[in-house]
Amino acid sequence: MDADITHVLLVGGTGRFGGRLASALLARPGIHLHVLVRPGARSDALVSLAEHGVTLVSGTLDDMRSLDTALEGVDAVVSAVSGPPEVQVEGQLRLLDSARRHGVIRFIPSDYSLDYTDADAGDAFMDAHRRVADAVVKSGVPYSFVLCGAFMETALSPQAQVFDFERGVVSYWGTGDEPFDVTAMADAARWVAEVVVDPHAACRRLEFVGDVATVNDVAALYEALTSQRLRRLCRGSVEDLRRQLMRARPEGVSVQVSSAQLSLLAQLAGTGRLREPANAEYPQLRPMTLRDFLEARWLLSTSARATLPLASQP
């Protein structure tokens, strides 16, 4: 652990993935966690954070003065924000500027996605990640970029437009044997908690993968675990999917929602795969596999299963 990093500011810490990040950072000995919260915000999640010793700091990404206050005495910033460009891009750039002026020694932007540097992953939604990453590198602030493919919770939900287990339907393009990378949110959060305090992770891009599979793999595994047959629906060729992604520019849709879909669909179209996983750098962390995930979702008792839902929202 880098002894210089003790105070960590988490932005977006009450969101779905942000909540996992908060838990993972709280579990790290020696870290004092600060979480940026909207003025006047009240929720059970915030009460729980405060009860665990988290410092709640009032502020917003569009208020530079509040960001400057939040960053006083902070060593590292971890972002888990999502939303339209004014949040995902402009908001993070303001956060970065304040971090630079306050001498922050580690900045982790809100990536946690496929490889958006892939020249073929030319979707507008990935441009937000590229713009922020370019600014981070140019700022001179030590950084870590964390990529993890698609989240299992969204990739295996109807949101991603591939798996709809409740309706018994699985969609695919091409043959269904196109591989993709997935990671459980809790595992991605634990890797981030390791990276933020690791001096060897400074100024690097790190890729982490929980599991690699194909649509056919997941469908067969689900059928084996549940004894329920899925209806396969071919929606076209891989080239059809590529064309669909290139013309997908819906207005008014948050970056994170679309990225959740794109993180799986782009991989099925042959782009954005993670080629150099860094899992071995943190051998103490053993990620959940797709089998683990499906077993937790479909084979636990009804009461236990309720705590592990597949996502219908980001």
Image (cartoon, rainbow, N blue to C red):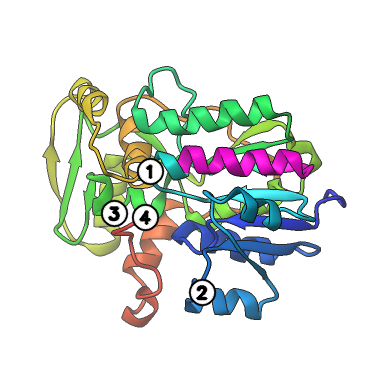
Task: Kindly identify the amino acid type of the residue bearing the numbered disc 1.
Answer: Pro
What's the magenta region? 88-106
- Give the distance between the C-alpha atoms of the residues marked 2 and 3, in whole angstroms: 24 Å
Which residue extends farthest top?
119
Residue drawn at 73 percent across, 29 percent down: 140
- In the image, residue 19 sits, relative to residue 126, either above or below, namely below
SS for dot 2: helix
- In the image, residue 55 sits, relative to residue 229, either above or below, namely below
Residue drawn at 42 percent across, 28 percent down: 127
**What residue sits right under mark 4 in the picture?**
314
The earlier-in-sequence mark between 2 and 3 is: 2
SS for dot 3: loop
Percent coordinates x, y for residue 266 in the rendering: 33, 31
Percent coordinates x, y for residue 20 in the rendering: 54, 62
Marks 2 and 4: which is nearer the front?
2
Q: Nearer the viewer, residue 163 or 6?
A: 6
Residue 84 got which mark?
1
Marks 2 and 1: which is nearer the front?
1
Residue 45 got which mark?
2
Task: Kindly identify the amino acid type of the residue bearing the numbered disc 3.
Answer: Ser
C-beta proximity under 8 Å, tags 2 and 3: no
The earlier-in-sequence mark between 3 and 4 is: 3
Q: Taking the image as drawn, is residue 279 in sight?
A: no
**What residue sits right under mark 3 in the picture?**
157
